[in-house]
Amino acid sequence: MAAPRRKNEPRRRSSPIGWLVLGALAAAPAVFTRSTVESFEFPKATLWITVSLLLAAAAIATEGTRAGSEGPGRWPAAIPARLVRWARSDPTGACVVLFVMSAGASTVTSMNPIVGLHGAPDSFAGLPTAIATASVYFASRAFSSDPRWLPRIAGSAAIASAIAAGYALLQLSGLDPLGWHRTASFGGAVRIFGTLGHPNLLGAYLVAALPLVVWRGLRAGSWASKAGFLAVSAASLAAIVATLSRGAWIAAAASLAAWLLLRRRAAGADSRSARAAEPRRSGASRGAASRTWLAAAIGLLALGAALIPVARSLGPSLPQRLREIGSLASPTTRSRLLIWQAGGRMAKDHPLFGVGLDAFNSAFPRYRTREYWRVEWGGTPTKAHNELVQIAATQGGFGLLAALLVVGFVSRATWRATRARSPLDRDGAVFSGAALVGFATQDLASFTTVSTGTLAAALAGWVAARDGGRANDPAPPPRPIDPAPGAWVAGLLGAGLLFVPFVMSPWRAERAAHDALAAPLWSRERIEGLRTAEAITPWNAGYPARLGNSLLVLARRAEDPEERWGLLSQAYSAYERAIRLEPHRAFERSCIGRALAMQSELRPGLVTMDRAREAFEEARRLDPTNTLVLLQEEDTYLGMGRHEEARASALRIAALDPEYAKPFADLGLIASRAGRYEGAADTLELAVSKDFHGDSASAADAWSNLSGAYVNLGRYEDALHAAERALEVLPEHAAAVKNRETALRALGRPG
């Protein structure tokens, strides 16, 4: 229910810009597409960038009209005084601007400015996203004088939660009509991810939105509306449990604790207001309280009914996950600690502006330890999984200070608003504060996404407008400026110019790349699609890197020397383009080494092996603990028959990761090729007892090579067993089939 309009207060008109923001708050968490390479965060980020461009167009139109009315002399002269008044009236907003300035400075000084400008792949947290989130804060603050604004934000959050939680529960029940390849699991149970793309991100959003959904349900006028909001609340809680996200569970507990604290503080103001207005509570108010308690009881029953099937679906995974809360022995906990340590070292080495906005992934290889590689084999995190560490590492002390100031001012505004004169403001501050605490708590073990960040920004804008009680008895607002048509044209033209490189071109490139990546790695369709994507967004290093991979594989399959040379030259050029954009790319440098080595075989007079070795050495320097980078070098030497160099590379990998099977398998193969079958068998026996990390082809090769060594040693029973193990992994493995037949003949058994 909206607060009554004050006497002589003008009737508020709903702004199209306000509805645009509310629509995006409802739609962004729910939107996803299967037509782009990244299905979830990319469409959400581009949606909000589009909204922010429209907000910028409106701001430009308004200021352009103001400048036209005040004249070319008065308008610029008044700007300093206006800025001072604004900063005094909105210190939170001033700190938000400071944070955006930090993001801009970190982009300019970044080790990878292009990533800062456009966002890292699978992250999309570049400068446009930071500006978009800030624009939500300022839009929300501008509309917060309307008492309907916060209930409308809560309504948007309820719509998004209903879609996200509903789809997640469909996944839990096995009724998801869409098939997904990239899913997270725990203890054999597939973790639901809804419309957010990952269980942790789903849990984070639902935790932040849940207090708003509950508040909206408690304020609903009809029982049908209350039932709808309570159903969304119950579904959200059930989905939060089913995500198996420890961060979301802890954040939910923190949100509840914050609600209790803020509710207690607001209760004092409620009681004083009640005594001043009416000495005794009326029967109507007692009836309203009874209805609230009845709604809460029904909600608890609905929650219990929703959690029973969730607990049954999760089985033993739920209690096992609960036991892992706070356990340092958990692999994911250990991984987080190692990432935070790396982020701390980044911040220490780059104390002012950090390594660069959204450049955590770019910088991480320099700070990765051997222990991290063993815990998260083959992984390079895009984020620090702690927002404070992320900001300190990527934006330095400047960004961290600005972020802490924003948190401090928002906390102060929320605390003060719980003693506001308006019951709506007090109640809204309690539930908004609980939502913001839930958001901030999960950020300590995760990271901000565009969905959680924009919701938090909208709430921060609302509570900031109530700082110091100014919203309780506001002065009449200044008459809004109606932008002139010419100013609108200028604003929309500027927004359109930015829309092309930051929204339209990335969408076209993602569509082309998505279709290309659906084709086989060596196919011409894939190569042409990636070339198209690169041509559309020449600043994206991911497309030429993937193009180089396809060309390199195609070159290895080519039988004609001239064709192979041409493909290798194209692969080399593609990798070079990727490295020019992102010089930190170690894997692409190792691929260049492989391409040069293959070219040296074809035309040794034009390309020497020394160039290949230099590329391999540079790759090792950039990412010294990356087994996959070292493996590229070892595979190259092994394929060329350079056994001594291959052996040296394999020994480096084995020393780096003693539990990785591949280098031991290759050492056994080298020994077998040299005729040292006893040593080969011993090494290969060791290899097959280790971890191939899902590389079934290498595992089958190792068992087959072990079978061959046994054949040469006359150990035919062992050879038969090893060959059969190889065929269990890859039933069509030709060498294993041959070894099995040889062993059977030697044993006098039928084939």
Image (cartoon, helix red, strand yellow):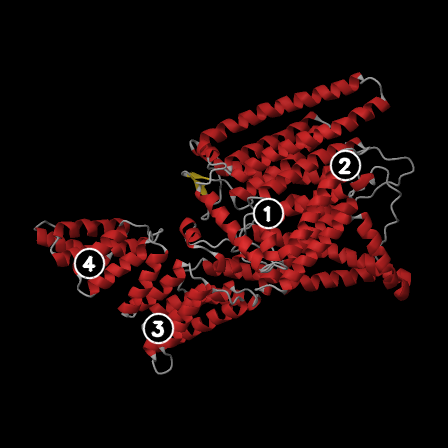
Amino acid type at circle 4 is Gly
Amino acid type at circle 2 is Ala
Q: Position of residue 7 (x, y in %)?
A: 91, 35
* Label 2: which secondary element: helix
The residue carrying mark 3 is: 598
The residue carrying mark 2 is: 417
Q: Which comes sooner in the sequence, label 1 or label 2?
A: 1
Are the residues tagged 1 and 2 within 8 Å (C-beta)? no
Residue in front for this viewpoint, 338 or 232: 338
Q: Which comes sooner in the sequence, label 1 or label 4?
A: 1
Q: Which mark is residue 679?
A: 4
Mark 1 or 2: in front is 2
Q: Which mark is residue 31?
A: 1
Q: Which comes sooner in the sequence, label 4 or label 3?
A: 3
Q: Position of residue 106 (x, y in %)?
A: 63, 60
Amino acid type at circle 3 is Met
Q: Residue furthest right?
A: 8
Label 1 to label 2, Cα distance in Å?
33 Å
Q: Quadrant of residue 597?
A: bottom left
- Would residue 738 be seen by someone viewing this image from the given angle? no
Are the residues tagged 2 and 3 within 8 Å (C-beta)? no
- Would residue 364 be seen by someone viewing this image from the given angle? yes
Please report the residue visible at 81 percent of the width from the left and 61 percent of the height from the top.
487
Label 4 to label 3, Cα distance in Å?
30 Å
Mark 3: few, some, or many residues within 10 Å (few <14, many ≥20)?
many
Please report the residue visible at 73 percent of the width from the left and 21 percent of the height from the top.
289
- In the picture, measured across the screen, residue 548 lies left or right of residue 603, that is right
Residue in front for this viewpoint, 363 or 572: 363
Label 1 to label 4, Cα distance in Å?
58 Å
Q: Which comes sooner in the sequence, label 3 or label 1?
A: 1
Mark 1: few, some, or many residues within 10 Å (few <14, many ≥20)?
many
